[in-house]
Amino acid sequence: MTANEKKELGMLACKVRMGVVTATHAAKSGHPGGSLSAAELFTYLYFKEMKVDPANPAWADRDRFVLSKGHTAPGLYAALALRGFFPVGELETLRHIGSRLQGHPNMNETPGVDMSTGSLGQGVSCAAGMALSAKYMKKDLRVYTLLGDGEIEEGQVWEALMFAHHHKLDNLCVIVDNNGLQIDGRIEDVMSPYPIPDKLKAFGLHVVEIDGTDFEQMEAAFAEAKATKGVPTAIVMKTTKGKGVSFMEDKAGWHGKAPNDEEYAQAMSELNAALAEWEAK
């Protein structure tokens, strides 16, 4: 990855975070914490990794993305808007009546959304089905799905992973956002899924562990996933909930709470400063 590519991605990740803060502030509700922790991932997928066409969202040969942790839709919407699937200004309609951008993704309404999600634990099953279908239809496409680390406490996740291994779905990439927090607190206190990599390996997945804010590690991990044959790949990325906004970082309370006017102003000030740092590199 060139220095300029890294700079462009870093700037875009800042803008994704700005979109998350803007959308949740405008809605006066939503889930900023887990959206912010995955900002680099959303950015990398839609601007570097995935084969998509904003002018033709239903393109049959596109790569697919399933946001299994559907409550972090503000992060997905911000990336889709920046990629050109719909106007950035539409982010301010989040959760409004009549908006295409509801609290959880709706594939029937929102351009670029490949699966309606929200009930935790179910998205990976949908992604596995898509990957199997692509195999049957001999389509050269890949399927990506993002799960929360609290979400993987759900049993259906592990059934789906067993299915994916059984069917040798090497076109499936499962990503776990390991930010350590869920709505009720620390994941190890609620229902510990640790050790996450060991459990994924036990279910037959090829596992890569990365820093979820490092684009170079992300690039290497996705390249490794593509090179792995016969089994699905899981990428476990270590992140910080609320990343990029000082008062939200590593705070479970920001799982599902919108910033007020004062908090919005502070968050945007911090993110604009971060954007300026990237621009200066």
Image: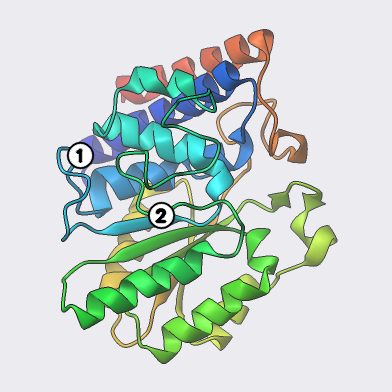
Q: Nearer the viewer, mark 1 or mark 2?
A: 2
Q: Residues within 10 Å of mark 1 (few under 14, many from 20)?
A: some
Amino acid, disc 1: Pro
- 122 versus 249 height, above or below: below
- 216 versus 100 height, above or below: below
**Can you give x and y, in whole percent of width and height, for residue 38 in the image?**
50, 45
Q: Residue at x 24, y 48 (%)?
A: 48
Element at badge 2?
loop
Is residue 156 or residue 215 the one in the foreground?
156
Q: Residue at x 77, y 35 (%)?
A: 253
Is residue 27 or residue 8 the one in the foreground?
27
Q: Quadrant of residue 9?
A: top left
Q: Residues within 10 Å of mark 2 (few under 14, many from 20)?
A: many
Q: Residue at x 51, y 79 (%)?
A: 161
Q: Are marks 1 and 2 in contact (CB under 8 Å)?
A: no
Residue 78 seen by the camera: yes
Q: Which mark is residue 249?
A: none
- 40 versus 258 height, above or below: below
Coloring scheme used: rainbow
**Can you give x and y, in whole percent of width and height, for residue 104 in the image?**
53, 42
Judged from this view, the residue extending furthest toward the right is 189
Determine which residue is flagged by label 1.
Answer: 54
Q: Residue at x 30, y 58 (%)?
A: 64
Q: Which image quarter is the C terminus in?
A: top left
Residue 235 seen by the camera: no
The disc, 1 or 2, on the residue closer to the chain's N-terminal end is 1
Element at badge 1?
loop
Q: Quadrant of residue 152?
A: bottom right
Amino acid, disc 2: Met
Is residue 63 or residue 203 the one in the foreground?
63
Q: Is residue 265 left or right of residue 94?
A: right
Determine which residue is flagged by label 2.
Answer: 115
